Image: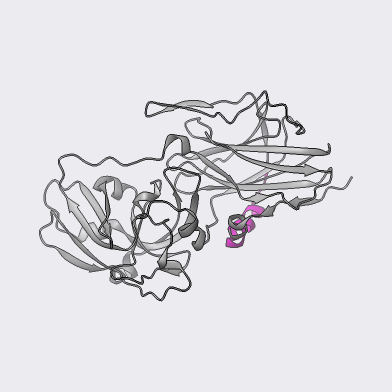
Amino acid sequence: MNKRNRGMLAGAAGAMLLLSGSGFALSALHPSAADASGAPEGTIHTSNGNTIDASWLDLEDESGYVRASDVQGTFVFNQLGTTPNDELFNVFGAALTSMCSKPAVELTTDAEGVASYYVNVGGHIEKNLTIDVSELAEDASEETLMACSCATGAPLGQAAVLGVPLSSIVEMADLEEGVNTITAYGADGFGQPLPLRYALEKNAMLVYQVNGQELTTATEGSSLQLWMPETVARYFTRNITDIELTREESVPEVQEADPCYRNKINIMNYADGCTFAAGDEITFEGVADDLGSPITAIEFTFDGGRTWTTCETEGATADKWVNWQFTTSFEQTGDYEMTVRAKTADGNVSPLAATLLFTVS
């Protein structure tokens, strides 16, 4: 039987992810055959004293799904692709102070805002100053892809951001001895203190453009946003008007992602309305991110976790998501259930896996 390549339907996020150029880049890579793994490993681990159990495994499940063991296929990945702005800022629905709160006036099409890049710098410095970040843009601006993930829940995204390194602002301030904390305050007066060293080591940025779209504000204050790789979205402050550099008795702790929501994995397409015939090549796709630790493999099971197909993501870095595609085929007709999880450099697997149901007829 001649095999036909049949892709799943892309959801809202998946469609834009492909339109952003990710799909083209994936097809340009040389696919490597996936290797079958043995028994699942790393399903139970500890983090900050908490025991994390991948409780989604159910080896005793006796559902009517076809059990396909040690499924082989071709696998490709890259770390490209972006999340559309309306989804990045509105669908996340995180803390009201973060960049992914809703609604995001800065990027709504009907907002009649203006761009303002002034920020006041004060605290334990020799002299307070006001900086127009746009004046630094010509010499100090940087553009990068950066992932963003909420501390709890499933949302994760990635954007191409353009801005000025926070270090450029700090260098302009004459710091008093012992300054160890930086706090970026939004127009509403709320700010999240961060260790100054952490913010500089992470190459935090004052961003004024997201996915090619200039940020604006319909209210008083700046339209700048704070972005940091490998850092939870609650620190991605919007409408930054003030930056305080202070000397604190104790350096603030950085909130990390809830261990139950580390190592997130998403499937970016769906099977509703798709018809697959026996022998068709079916392409699955999605993204994974651990928010601080590199993703080293994407793993698939089509038999409820009895066997896993491990596809390595060699060279993936922690500051961006892993955008993956897995293509395989099935000769037996019936209903199938695919479960996918990610594995990190420390050997842990996703506590919450993603599942997709489809039918081969």
The answer, for residue 239, to whether it is visible in the render is yes
x then y, percent, for residue 277: 84, 46
In magenta stretch: residue 138: no
Find residue 334 and report its image quarter: top right
Horizontal side of residue 102 vs 356, given as left or right: left
In this figure, what is the number of numbered marks? 0
Horizontal side of residue 339 vs 336, given as left or right: left
x then y, percent, for residue 64: 76, 32
Q: Is residue 350 above or below residue 46?
A: below
In magenta stretch: residue 20: yes
- 109 vs 145, nearest the viewer: 109
* Colouring used for the render: one colour
Q: Is residue 241 above or below residue 355?
A: below
Q: Quadrant of the N terminus?
A: top right
- 160 vs 25, nearest the viewer: 160
Find residue 327 and report its image quarter: top right
Q: Is residue 168 above or below residue 269?
A: below
Magenta residues span: 17-32
x then y, percent, for residue 82: 53, 57
Residue shown at 28%/61% (left/top)? 188
x then y, percent, for residue 42: 53, 27
What secondary structure prevails in the magenta region?
A: helix
Horizontal side of residue 333 vs 180, given as left or right: right
Residue shown at 53%/61% (left/top)? 84
- 65 vs 69, nearest the viewer: 65
The answer, for residue 262, to whether it is visible in the render is no
Q: Quadrant of the C terminus?
A: top right
